[in-house]
Image (spheres, rainbow, N blue to C red):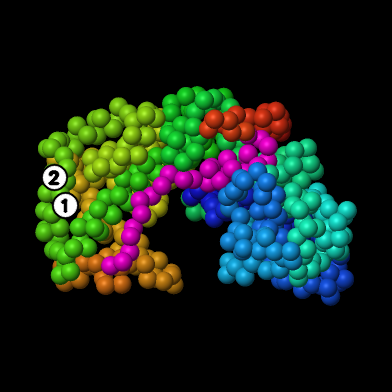
Amino acid sequence: MQAQLLPGLTTQTTNVRYVSLLTAGRYLRQIAGEGATKGTPLSDFWRRLEALIAVCSVLHHHQDGETLRGIIGKTYADRVVSATMIPLETKLRNPPYNIYRGTLGALGLFDLSQRSDPLYEGAQALGGAWQPPVSSELGRLLATGNLPRVVEKASLVRIAGNFCLCRVPDGSAEQQKLVDLLFGLKSPEDPPQFSTDGSFGQGARVASWRLLLELVAVSPGQVLWSHHLMERILEPDVLSLPLVEPLRQTMLAWRWVAARSFFERGWTIIFNETFDRLHDKPLGLSQAELRTLMQEWYLSHHGKEDIGDLVQDARRNIQSRDWYTQKYQEPRPRECLQLMAAGLLAAEEDRRTTEASILEALRCSGAIPFNSEYARLLAAVARKDSTSEFWAETSLETLIHHVRIGLRKMRYGNPDSLHVDYEDGQWMIPTKALGWEPRPAEAFSRLDVAMGWARQLGLVTLRDGFSTLTALGTEVKRRWDKLYGQWA
Ligand SMILES: [Zn+2]
């Protein structure tokens, strides 16, 4: 879902400059033609360029002591950076090119359907925007599409900034072309197509980028990352922002993502607690035994309470940032139920009040559909169940879904990911899963990666932990609105 809303970025690392540097590398290879191929085979060229990027990203900050995040091959770079002669070889099993290849394809830069992934015609502008530093020997070699096996460290110090991942230089052609590309400023995209059985199209990408700037603009003095960002998106004023209709729809889809992330936080912690209780039972537990155990365990933490009262409390707070923050950061059993309920209620409220077709479709989709979970919650309220009963029922549900999702994945040829077994009426942990330590879902989203890119691109600055738009960010927002006013 997030990948459809904001395609063209990887969540594995957070450095936009890989996009421009790899595109420039491919561009230099293409204009050099056969000469390049004779000198350095393409796969060697990629490995050497990746190593050069890693080393330069460490070298560029040797003086200021800053450590950049997301340098792929940082261990290698730290090791070789003190040597006089540096071998351009990271020996990574999963090199940056492989990690970014999907992103480069999704952004319409590399044609992945052909051998050697040549650039699309439209990628030439970005490819030619970054210039190799031809004042150095290495730069002159790179201009011919080649790179050496080993480089002298002294020659790198001066040009490290050209390859460093820290930021895209302000006012550079590289910056301009990247921004044009991500925001769709050169040729407008069609509005996103919200159907859950296909891609939303490139319109969703340019809309999500525009929304990111909007969120920064309307949130002075607010923390905008991880669950804080999701909390911000769920606040009521977001719905009354003056946005063209496709942007408003995209925002509603992101609000659904936000609601979903709080639900999943609660859900995964309940699963983990259930897993932990089963862990101590080598012979397994029957359904009834597990239900009793989980209920008793809940009551050892909290008193008796109607689930209806808990739902009322969540309903009052579905737009309150502080309420979410507290539940998110201190998720005891009761808080987990509150997070789940709030996620379901927030999504339901949006669906009811906005009548957006995308929300109708989304609530019935996914491995754990919201419509059935919402119905299960309402049924518990109608029965006047206690919170401990609902907790125990949910804990069984999380196991059932875990097995169902695992089996479905295996049917599609994925490896066995089952960490719980149900056999002869007993729930148990298989031996292979005894060492597994499940982690709760975090509310980290693709918007967090995009926020990092926006900072490296000079669209957003971070001061005292708060984001603000730069002059360039404001200008891009204005250009976008002018170009996409026709979407209204
Ligand atoms: Zn740097």
Cα gap from disc 1 to disc 2, whole angstroms? 10 Å
Whether the residues at callouts 1 and 2 have beta carbons within 8 Å, the answer is no
Crowding near the residue tagged with mark 1, few <14, some 14–19, many ≥20 C-alpha atoms within 10 Å: many
Name which quarter of the figure residue 102 lies in.
Answer: bottom right
Q: Is residue 421 left or right of residue 185?
A: left
The residue pinned by badge 2 equals 300
What amino acid type is highlighted by mark number 2? Ser
- Determine if residue 359 is in view: no
Give the residue drawn at x 79%, y 41%. 172
Image vertical order of residue 467 relative to residue 366, above or below: above
Number of numbered markers: 2
Give coordinates of residue 305: x percent, y percent. Answer: 14, 36
Helix, strand or loop at label 1? It is helix
Residue 446 is a magenta residue:
yes
What amino acid type is highlighted by mark number 1? Met
Name which quarter of the figure residue 97 lies in.
Answer: bottom right
- Determine if residue 240 is in view: yes
Give coordinates of residue 371: x percent, y percent. Answer: 33, 45
The residue pinned by badge 1 equals 294
Name which quarter of the figure residue 456 lies in.
Answer: top right
Front residue of this view, candidates 250 and 59 = 59
The residue segment tinted magenta is 434-460
